[in-house]
């Protein structure tokens, strides 16, 4: 079973040209060199196209590389797609799976995400599985129900040993890219609830060792309040991961 860790993961989404990506990676590497990262596991998730660039740099520096999506098959006639074995062969260690943008724009549902999770695990890629409710669901008080169903359908079919390798990211959809962050209390409440669900499905030990990240307009000005909560182990960062200063500041916000 993986140890519970402090994690800051940057989700660049579909941003940066090659030159810009290179500049940002060098800037992050330099700042990490200067400031260190303590006991935080730093993960950078650029577009998969830049995986080699990132893993080359990561090898000499103190961060890991993830991608933002993965195909649910190992190989074959799936034009335009990228598989877990390919990514693993490039040194990619993590994959964001089930981000709300993929759920919304590409209609990815939990049963399908369950297959992506499995194929990632089979190739030693750690899934960073995203869950979270939309505003309508939060306003109707249905957030717990929604997150429970996402976890049940996509993850709770895993054996305990496999589940123990995952990272979970709670990302309330209404907070993503909107500047409207969940309050530390709202986030903590959901994280504690997720941990309780894991404990009920598996056991207390698995629940306590699972890293659960918060995502949604997390930035240097609000990170300390979030990261200091008992059940929040770090952040999945979108916008603020595109600037090295902000990203590295977040790493120092525990
Ligand atoms: P944001 O994105 O930090 O820009 O809100 C977070 C995410 O989508 O993972």
Image (spheres, rainbow, N blue to C red):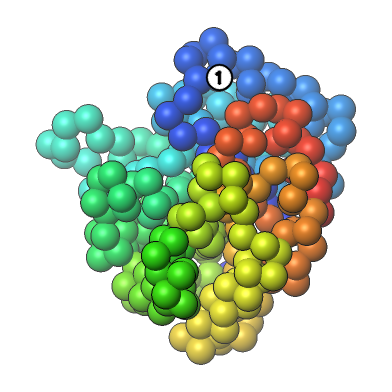
Which quarter of the rendering shows the C terminus?
A: bottom right
The x, y position of residue 200, in whole percent, is 51, 89
Q: What residue do we see at 33% from left, 47% from top?
A: 102
**Quarter of the view holding residue 28:** top right
The answer to whether residue 125 shows anywhere in this view is no
Task: Find residue 182 and report its horizontal and vertical position in percent.
Answer: 61, 60
Counting from the top left corner in percent of width and height, residue 62 is at 72, 36
Identity of the residue furthest to the right in this view: 35
Name the residue rendered at 52%, 33% in the picture. Answer: 12
Q: Nearer the viewer, residue 160 or 104?
A: 104
Point out the image quarter for the N terminus: bottom right
Label 1: how many Cα within 10 Å (few below 14, some 14–19, many 20+): some
Question: What residue appears at the point 42 percent right and 75 percent down from the top-left corner?
Answer: 140
Left or right: 139, with 104 as reference point: right
Name, please, the residue furthest toward the top: 19
Question: Residue most toward the left?
Answer: 77
Of residues 18 and 105, the one nearer the viewer is: 105
Q: Is residue 123 left or right of residue 167?
A: left
Q: Is residue 230 visible?
A: yes
Snapshot quadrant of residue 85: top left
Taking 192 as reference, is 39 above or below it?
above
Residue pictured at 76% horizontal, 42% vertical: 220
Report which residue position mark 1 lands on: 21
């Amino acid at each position: 079973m993986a140890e519970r860790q402090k994690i800051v993961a940057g989700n660049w989404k579909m941003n940066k040209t090659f030159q810009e990506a290179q500049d940002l990676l060098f800037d992050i590497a330099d700042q990490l060199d200067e400031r260190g990262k303590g006991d935080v596991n730093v993960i950078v998730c650029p577009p998969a196209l830049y995986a080699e660039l990132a893993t080359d740099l990561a090898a000499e520096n103190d961060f890991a590389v993830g991608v933002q999506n993965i195909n649910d098959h190992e190989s074959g006639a799936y034009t335009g797609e990228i598989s877990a074995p390919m990514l693993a062969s490039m040194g990619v260690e993590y994959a964001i799976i089930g981000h709300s943008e993929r759920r919304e724009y590409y209609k990815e549902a939990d049963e399908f995400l369950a297959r992506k999770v499995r194929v990632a695990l089979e190739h030693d890629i750690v899934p960073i599985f995203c869950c979270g409710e939309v505003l309508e669901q939060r306003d109707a008080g249905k957030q717990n129900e929604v997150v429970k169903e996402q976890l049940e359908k996509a993850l709770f079919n895993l054996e305990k040993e496999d589940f123990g390798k995952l990272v979970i990211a709670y990302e309330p959809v209404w907070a993503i890219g909107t500047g409207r962050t969940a309050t530390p209390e709202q986030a903590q409440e959901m994280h504690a609830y997720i941990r309780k669900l894991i404990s009920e499905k598996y056991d207390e030990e698995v629940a306590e060792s699972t890293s659960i990240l918060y995502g949604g307009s997390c930035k240097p000005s609000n990170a300390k309040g979030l990261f200091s909560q008992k059940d929040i182990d770090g952040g999945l960062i979108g916008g603020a991961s595109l600037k090295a200063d902000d990203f590295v500041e977040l790493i120092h916000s525990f």
